[in-house]
Amino acid sequence: MKALKLTLSLAVASLWYRRRTLSLVCLTLTLSVTLLLGIQYLRTEVRSAFTSTINGTDLIVGARSGQLNLLLYTVFHIGNATNNIRWSTYQDLKQDSRINWLIPISLGDSYKGFRVVATNDQFSQRFRYGDNQALELNEGAWFGDLFDVVLGAGVARQLDHQVGDRIVLSHGGGSTSFSNHDQLPFRVSGVLSATGTPVDQAVYISLEAMEAIHVGWQSGVAIPGRTLTGDQARAKDFTPDAITAVFVGLEQPIMTFRVQRELNQYQPEPLSAILPGVALSELWRIMGQFERALLGISVFVVLTSLVGLITVLMTLQAQRQREIAILRATGASPALIAGLYICESLALALTACGAAVLIGAGTIASLSSWILESYGIAISLRPLTDQEWLLLGAVPVAALIASLVPAIGTGRASRLRGF
Amino acid sequence: MRNKATQADTGDIPAVQTRGLSFTWPGQQQPMAFPDIDLNPGDHLFIHGPSGSGKSTLLNLLAGMILPGAGDIHLLGTRIDALRAGARDRFRADHIGVIFQQFNLVPYLSALANVTLPCRLSAQRLARTGNQAETQARQLLDQLAIPEDHWHRGVTRLSIGQQQRVAAARALIGAPGLILADEPTSALDTDNRDRFLDLLLKLAERSRSSVLFVSHDRSLAQHFHQQIALGESA
């Protein structure tokens, strides 16, 4: 007990004496641990952000195609729909008592490379992403007028649009389109809050507006004299003939597979119904290379930092032969010297780990909203996972091992060399 | 001096008694042989010899840091070469003070803390200060002419002469039976050397500690009760 107290008090004095060198060592170590935790954190967060791109939607229904294709064009706005589904099919689904809600979407147009998604009020009310989060308007309101448009956060940020701006949509996809809906400009009525999902990268109009701007168009070209003016359009009532896809929410999620099977066998037209979660994890399996690369990087970071830690500790201890000789001559046992080394290394490692966690948490807490606003990546603070605790725990363990090498060496050397 | 009569006269167990000591460093062809030593408690021994004659090896053997290849070592009645490593460490803590040539002090402890260090490692040394380690340390530092404002300072700011005197105080505290000094004056100028030696021997006599003093400077031999020379015969 007394020896432990002496060891601790010597360790404290020794650490304090070397504080300048050690603070640099500790900083290096802290940065490696922060980097390690950061990469690990990013890895899991990107994955969870990806898998929570869409939430609460039980089925996505579109024209017959593969599930990845359907997921890509409905959720990620990548690629094109194979076909549309009839409005009557949508009406049919609406009658189904097992279905709680439907979000119809209609795609095909774009605005400066961003997809135009035509939908109805169900989108703002029912769509969920992340941890069951609803869409929120950062400013403005949802569609009031026929020619109102709501911008995703990313679109508004990149094109620097505010509520009240007038914009002209283009026919078809692509960032440069030669056929624009320039007779019928839209007014920005609202801008969505950032979600960190593809929702940020699209502009939203009503289904009716989508119909209105295509009156008098044939084969992708406006026929002069057959298009409407804004006031003519506002006077008319538009019901779409077809939509691209429907997001479906069921009354009871347990019915999902049954409804999916029935929709896949829907008689009036060929449909595909997919489970977004399943499709997302299939997609992640393809994109997961990136995650594996990050995992590889973090393994190297761990190894590098641990080797660095061992090197630093051994260098420090090599400079202490004189001091150790004095302690040994005064009667300190090799165990006490080993204890001294171990205490110091552990103190260093634990300080670095603590600082790394604080720095990491502080950075994420203070920057997460800024990262979401400026980069559209949703990273939130969460407790450490078991794996991360394990990584964190490996640092003091490595420090312990690193300190044992010279500790054992001291015992042997003093038997061989004397003082 | 090497006779039983002297021992009987003082009625004490000898401070140091070695017989037929030899030691071989790894890679050495010939074992180093050392002359036998008999030293009465409180007597001082001067060990002289050129570099490489095995002076430091002898001190290491006497301190129990290394074990002899042959022969035996009795210190204050204990045969230390028969002790286990841990017991030798404890024996050293309890009964031996060591002064090196230089860099004698733990750099992160104050002068006072360096002096009291043996009392923290050995309950016996603490007990022999009357459980007043700090009081005795202050007395020793005072007697060794270390100015009081230096006591709480980092020891790296002391002069070499002061550092050696602080080391002497550390060796002397708690009145160990034996003080091993490995050329402690070689880094000092003549004035400092004589002063150091005077103080060390005077204070050692007060606590009845035997000093084993290694030096290549033969002129110091006159201060000691006994002397042996290494190298020529070994």
Image (cartoon, coloured by chain):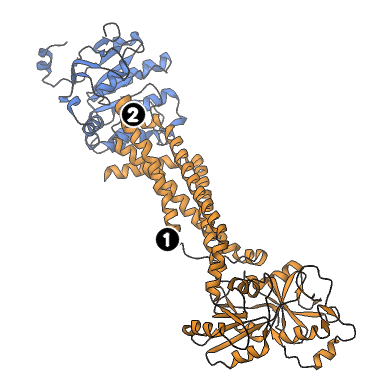
Chain colours: A orange, B blue
What residue sits 31% from the left and 39% below the top? A336
Q: Position of residue A11 (x, y in %)?
A: 38, 42
Amino acid on which the number 1 mark rests in the picture: Asp
Nearer the camera: disc 1 or disc 2: 1
SS for callout 2: helix
Along the viewing direction, whichever of A368 and A218 lies nearer the viewer = A218
Question: Rounded to the nearest whole Å, what is the CA distance between mark 1 and mark 2?
Answer: 40 Å
**Can the viewer see residue A325?**
yes
Which three-letter amino acid code belongs to the residue tagged 2? Ala
The residue tagged 2 is: A413
Secondary structure under the numbered disc 1 in the rendered image? helix
The residue singled out by tag 1 in the image is: A386
Question: Callout 1: residue from which chain?
Answer: A
- Whole-percent x and y of residue A231? 84, 90
B12 on left or right of B229:
left
Taking the spot 63% from the left edge, 63% from the top edge, the residue there is: A371
Question: Residue at image x 20%, y 13%?
Answer: B36
In the image, residue A130 above or below residue A247:
above
- Which residue is more in the foreground, B107 or A124? A124
